Amino acid sequence: MSAPRDPVRVFQLLLAHPAIVALTDAARAEGVEAHLVGGILRDRFLGLPSHDLDAMVSHRGRAVAERLAEALGARLVHLGGKSFGAYRLVLGRSDQDGHSVLDLWDREGTTLDEDLARRDFTVNAVSLSTPLGELYDPFGGLDDLRHRLLRATTPTSFTGDPLRVLRLPRLLTQLPGFSADSPTLELARAAAPSLATVASERVREELAQLFSKPEPQRAVAMLDSLDLYPGLWIGRPGQAVLGAAGVRTQTGAVCGELAQLAPCALRLRQIADGPPPFPIDHRLARLALTFAHLGSLSPGADPEEALKRFAQAGYLTRQDASSVAALLDRPRLPEDALGQRRFLHDLGELWTTCGCFAGARATGDAAELRRWEDSVAALVALDHREGTAIRHPPRLLDGGEIGALLGVGPGPAIGRAVAALHAAQVEGRVTTVEEAKKLVRGLT
């Protein structure tokens, strides 16, 4: 896909966008300059879909934002706190172009050049004035867009905000056909150790975006080249991890399995003869694969312990960490009927994600892959027949009925009986009230 040659023509429609017209009117009413900047210009130039509108004003950001909120019927959120002026206008339902948010930044008296110099990459350091549509490109961002190149805006791009070290691989996977120049890679690698000083929620959000993109194997290869994988995973971001032979960590096995997740998801869909029983969370499966190989990538590293530290650092939510741990516990799918029933119960709606995770790990061996396909077919059939009852066994007896059968009052004995009955239902040994009563009587 070739980039457009005439950026002015490409951006003309943006100036007629209702939210941009409202921005122009609000800025004029407050007597300030307004510009479109950043991702909206980059993505429009590349012909990519965009969901956020990015703009800035020279002064009086709050007043402009309040006018905009009133004109657009939008919800106003103050993002900047006390350190800088930034406002988000939530537009409600997406407009016809798919935009649902307008982010507005207040330059607060700094020059346009100073503002653009603070931006991460030259492709994001282009501005378009409203309403005249004058382009300003002091760092050659348009040429870099034409050449599909990510280049640091200034030598301090990464030291000013080390999170950009992660944003680099994320954009390389997000923007088709892009690469980074060598000086930018060196700047990012030098700043990688400082990622440990960035607020954990910012790192968590960037990682979530990174592993939600296609081609995760490319992202991991880039993280490796920046000494962030497995460095960040084992608590040493920016430090090259050496293997037993004293050579740079090789991530080929991880990348190979990551590349197989999508084919495994497709095969699961084919076996299910339609959509799988539950959505497949590719992001969680991808993260699990990055932890699964830590022991071989960094001798002495334990994947489960690394996952705990990673979550304690705030780089994963508790729920995501629990889900990744559940996947790591099941690198292979069960082949026996009893194991499959327990698997569906324990994993619940996560089982299809675990199925893809296990499939990706099996693709290097033809026999393992055939066993995986057979197990998936059996699990799909079992889920169709009894999935709800296995995941959520119905209550056949209450505590009072169990106590009467055992001849005991409330206490641990009833709790043990409830657990035994539950396990028997999951395993398919008990399906009726009479069978439940028989099992409980046998516990005396």
Image (tube, rainbow, N blue to C red):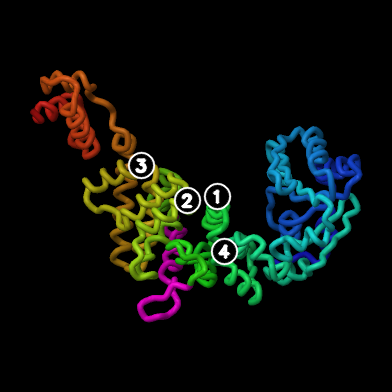
Q: Which mark is residue 348?
A: 3
Q: Say whether disc 1 or disc 2 marks the residue closer to the N-terminus.
A: 1
Q: Tell me which corner region of the image, top left, top right, bottom left or bottom right, holds residue 186.
A: bottom right
Q: What element carries label 1?
A: helix
Q: Which mark is residue 233?
A: none
Residue 255 sits inside the magenta stretch: yes
Dot in front, 4 or 2: 4
Q: Locate residue 258, reporting x and y percent.
A: 45, 63
Give the amino acid type for the residue marked by disc 2 in the picture: Leu
Figure check: 180 above or below 420: below
Give the amino acid type for the residue marked by disc 4 in the picture: Ser
Q: Name the residue under label 4.
A: 194
Left or right of 304? Residue 168 is right
Q: Say whether disc 1 or disc 4 marks the residue closer to the N-terminus.
A: 4
Q: Locate residue 342, reporting x and y percent.
A: 26, 44
Q: Name the residue under label 1.
A: 201
